[in-house]
C-alpha cells in the first residue's frame, strides 16, 4: 500500500515508528561491540508474553552488535517445587535458607528447568544461546555467605547460618568470553562451587553484578518487579550517582530486596562497570526502552566521574 493512500492515523503510526528507529540509532552505536549483563527474573520470566518479548529483545541486541550475557533467577519456580515436595522455605533478609536437600532441588529447577527454557526461547526466536551452570567448570567459585545479625536490645552480633547459600569469590571470564567468541549468548544459572566441591545457591542479582564487574561490562541491567528505586513519596528516582546511592541506602524507605540490588550496582560500578540500571521487567520490551531511547526507564546509577 502506497503511503499517499493511507489514512491520517496510519500515516502518524508509521511516522512515529520511523522516528523511534531514528532515535535508537545513536544508542545502537553507543552500545555496539559492548558487553551488557542482564539479570532476568521475577514476573518477566513467568509471564508468557513477557518472556517471549524478552527473548526477541535479546536476539535484537545480538543482531545490532552487542554482547548480551543473561543471568537468571528462579525464586517463584523454586518455591513452587519446594511446596510441591512439602518442604518449608525460610528466608533471612530475602535469602532462602538452603540445606543440602534443598540445594539439590534449587539446582534442578535453575539448571534443568529454567535455564533450558530460556535457551530454548532465545533459540526459537532467532538467537543462538548456550546454557551455563555457575557450579560447573569452575565458572563461579564461591564461599558460604556469612550474615551478621545484631540484637536490638543487647547490641550483640551473631553469625546467621543460611546453609548452602553463597557469594562469588571468582568468576571464570575465560569461559564466558569463549562462549561469546563463538557467537553465542551465555545464559547463566546462579550457582557456585566452593573449595570442598559443594554447590551453593547464590542470589541472581549478586551473580549478575559480580560477572559485570569481572568482565568489565559497559552496562548492568537488573530486571525487577518494581519501577526502580523510589523516594519517600514513592516516586521514581531516575538517576543516582553511586555516592548518592550510598546515602539513600540508609534511608528507612529503602526496604526489602532493593538494598542488595543497590549494593550490587554500587559494587559493579566501583569495579569498572560504566552504568547500572534497576528497571521494571513487567514492562514489555523494557530492555529495549532502557538501552535505545533517550530517557530510558528505571533508575540509572553511575559513577560521579
Image: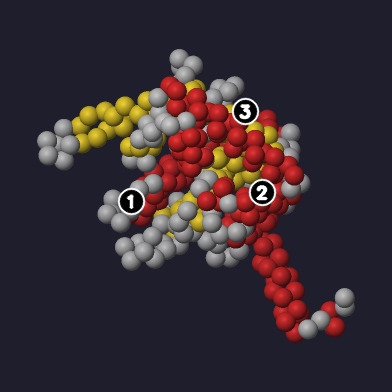
Q: CA distance from mark 3 to mark 2?
A: 25 Å
Marked residue nearer the N-terminal end (3 or 2): 2
Q: Is residue 161 left or right of residue 67?
A: left
Foreground of the two, 257 or 61: 257
User: Which residue is found at the position 36% from the left and 64% from the top?
Assistant: 234
Can residue 272 be spotted in the picture? no
Q: Residue lying furthest right in this view?
A: 2
Left or right placement of residue 98 versus residue 189 in this view:
left
Q: Which residue is found at the position 12% from the left and 35% from the top?
A: 154
Which residue is found at the position 51% from the left and 48% from the top? 42
What whole-number distance in Å separates the C-alpha atoms at marks 1 and 2? 30 Å
What x and y, as percent, mark residue 95? 38, 37
For image coordinates 73% across by 70% down, the residue present is 18
- Secondary structure at numbered mark 2: helix
The CA span between labels 3 and 1 is 36 Å
In the displayed structure, would residue 175 be above or below residue 117? above
Tell me the element at label 3: helix
Pointer 3 and pointer 2: residues touching (CB < 8 Å)? no
Q: Which image quadrant is residue 138 in?
A: top right
Q: Earlier in the sequence, mark 1 or mark 2?
A: 2
Which circle marks residue 255 in the picture? 1
Residue that carries the numbered disc 3 in the rendered image: 174
Q: How far across and down, in percent of the image, does residue 104 sit?
A: 50, 24
Locate residue 250 relative to residue 2 in the image: left or right: left
What x and y, as percent, mark residue 245?
A: 37, 52
For marks 3 and 1 on the same chain, the one whose residue lies earlier in the sequence: 3
Name the residue furthest top.
196
Q: Residues within 10 Å of mark 1 (few under 14, many from 20)?
A: few
Closer to the camera: disc 3 or disc 2? 2
Which residue has dot 2 on it?
55
**Does the rendering let one see residue 131?**
yes
| Mark 3 or mark 1, whichever is nearer to me | 1
Amino acid at each position: 500500500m502506497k503511503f499517499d493512500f493511507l489514512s491520517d492515523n496510519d500515516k502518524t503510526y508509521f511516522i512515529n515508528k520511523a522516528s523511534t528507529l531514528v532515535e535508537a540509532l545513536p544508542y545502537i552505536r553507543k552500545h555496539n561491540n559492548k558487553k551488557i549483563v542482564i539479570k532476568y527474573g521475577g514476573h518477566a520470566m513467568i509471564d508468557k508474553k513477557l518472556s517471549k518479548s524478552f527473548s526477541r529483545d535479546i536476539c535484537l541486541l545480538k543482531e545490532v552488535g552487542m554482547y548480551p550475557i543473561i543471568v537468571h533467577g528462579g525464586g517463584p519456580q523454586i518455591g513452587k517445587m519446594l511446596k510441591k515436595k512439602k518442604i518449608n522455605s525460610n528466608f533471612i533478609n530475602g535469602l532462602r535458607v538452603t540445606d543440602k536437600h534443598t540445594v539439590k532441588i534449587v539446582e534442578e529447577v535453575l539448571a534443568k528447568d529454567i535455564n533450558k527454557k530460556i535457551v530454548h526461547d532465545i533459540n526459537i526466536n532467532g538467537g543462538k544461546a548456550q546454557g551455563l551452570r555457575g557450579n560447573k567448570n569452575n565458572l563461579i567459585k564461591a564461599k558460604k555467605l556469612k550474615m551478621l545479625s545484631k540484637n536490638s536490645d543487647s547490641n550483640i552480633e551473631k553469625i546467621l547460618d543460611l546453609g548452602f547459600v553463597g557469594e562469588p569469590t571468582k568468576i571464570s571470564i575465560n569461559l564466558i568470553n569463549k562462549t561469546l567468541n563463538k557467537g553465542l549468548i551465555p545464559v547463566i544459572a546462579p550457582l557456585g562451587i566452593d573449595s570442598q566441591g559443594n554447590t551453593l545457591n547464590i542470589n541472581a542479582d549478586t551473580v549478575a553484578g559480580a560477572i559485570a564487574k569481572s568482565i568489565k561490562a559497559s552496562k548492568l541491567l537488573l530486571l525487577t518487579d518494581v519501577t526502580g528505586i523510589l523516594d519517600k513519596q514513592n516516586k521514581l528516582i531516575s538517576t543516582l550517582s553511586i555516592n548518592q546511592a550510598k546515602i539513600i541506602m540508609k534511608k528507612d524507605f529503602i526496604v526489602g530486596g532493593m538494598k542488595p540490588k543497590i549494593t550490587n550496582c554500587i559494587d559493579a560500578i566501583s569495579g569498572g562497570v560504566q552504568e547500572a540500571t534497576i528497571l521494571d521487567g513487567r514492562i514489555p520490551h523494557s530492555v529495549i526502552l532502557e538501552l535505545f531511547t533517550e530517557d530510558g526507564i528505571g533508575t540509572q546509577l553511575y559513577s560521579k566521574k
